[in-house]
Image: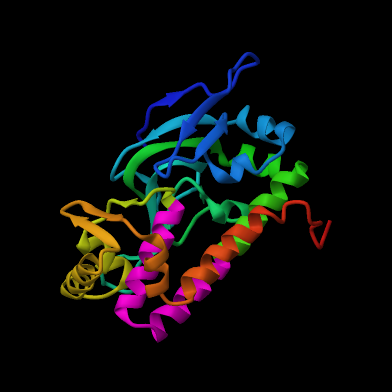
Amino acid sequence: MEHSSTRPLLSENSALFLKRNAYGESCCGLTCNEIVMRLSGPAQRCLLERCERVSLSKGQVLYDRGTPLRYGYFIESGGCSVTTRAGDSLPVEIHTLGMKDFVGVPLVLGMQTSPHRCTVRLAGQALRIESSVLIALIKRDAELEKIVLGYIQAILIHSSQLAACNSRHSLHQRLARWLVVASDRLGSPEVPFTHSYIANALAVRRAGITVAVGDLVHKGVIRSRRAGMTITDVARLKGMACECQGIILSAHNRYCTASHLPIAYS
């Protein structure tokens, strides 16, 4: 299922590097994954010593429904989609994941399998860690535990807000919200997904997405091409979206600044 090239990540003499995401924001350190970057130097190094950097290929399945979760992934570039099924219908997207995300939430919740599938939609790279090693590290590193649990809390808020959004808001609002959030998770104004993919993510007909995208292009907030689209005016796009995009982004931003808070059961 998992086929990817690997490279040693960290040695005693590893040099720092400087990377930039598509927004031009610098990522100074040994990784561009936001979760890992939020850790202090000692906690970050402890985690990185146990990771390996792997390439993610488009179409690669990182985990599937009901199969053992062998690894956790801290995405550095590219994008993944977490999907579920409803009967015999096509898979429906739950989350779009990028350089701000972690793949393997069920592991942290004590599960060895997942009811969902996670597939690479945009090639990139990630930090991969064996599931048993990750769990052992979380149990003894309070800082890592806090940041990962904070991330899971943000994911829960994200999921519940999507349920409300999909039942209350118009297609145009939901499309704008989806583009804003996907762009934020990918760390780029480029959203390289087709109309068919977005229609599946929003559980609507492709024709409806084509009309809504055309309207956004006409208003000058995005540029569209065959393989995806580019956000050209994110401020206006946020204004066209429902308030759900703000709630979702705020949830993810809050966990990033709450790592100093004590855990209730500590």
Which residue is rendered at x = 61% and y = 31% of the image? 48
- How many numbered discs sit on the rendered protein? 0
Is there any visible trace of residue 129 in the rendered image?
Answer: yes
Instruction: Tell me where the magenta segment starts and ends, as one range.
Output: 156-185
Q: Position of residue 3 (x, y in %)?
A: 35, 34
Is there any visible trace of residue 71 in the rendered image?
Answer: no
Furthest toward the top, the residue is: 13
Q: Quadrant of residue 143?
A: top right
Quarter holding the C terminus?
A: bottom right
Q: Position of residue 138 (x, y in %)?
A: 70, 44
Q: Nearer the viewer, residue 258 or 23?
A: 23
Q: Quadrant of residue 247?
A: bottom right
Q: Nearer the viewer, residue 195 or 140?
A: 195
Q: Is residue 87 magenta?
A: no
Q: Position of residue 68 (x, y in %)?
A: 48, 48
Q: Position of residue 52 (x, y in %)?
A: 52, 29
Which residue is rendered at x = 39% and y = 79% of the image? 166
Which residue is rendered at x = 71% and y = 32% of the image? 41
Q: Is residue 173 magenta?
A: yes
Judged left or right of residue 233, residue 68 is: right
Judged left or right of residue 138, residue 61 is: left
Which residue is rendered at x = 42% and y = 64% of the image? 235
Quarter holding the N terminus?
A: top left
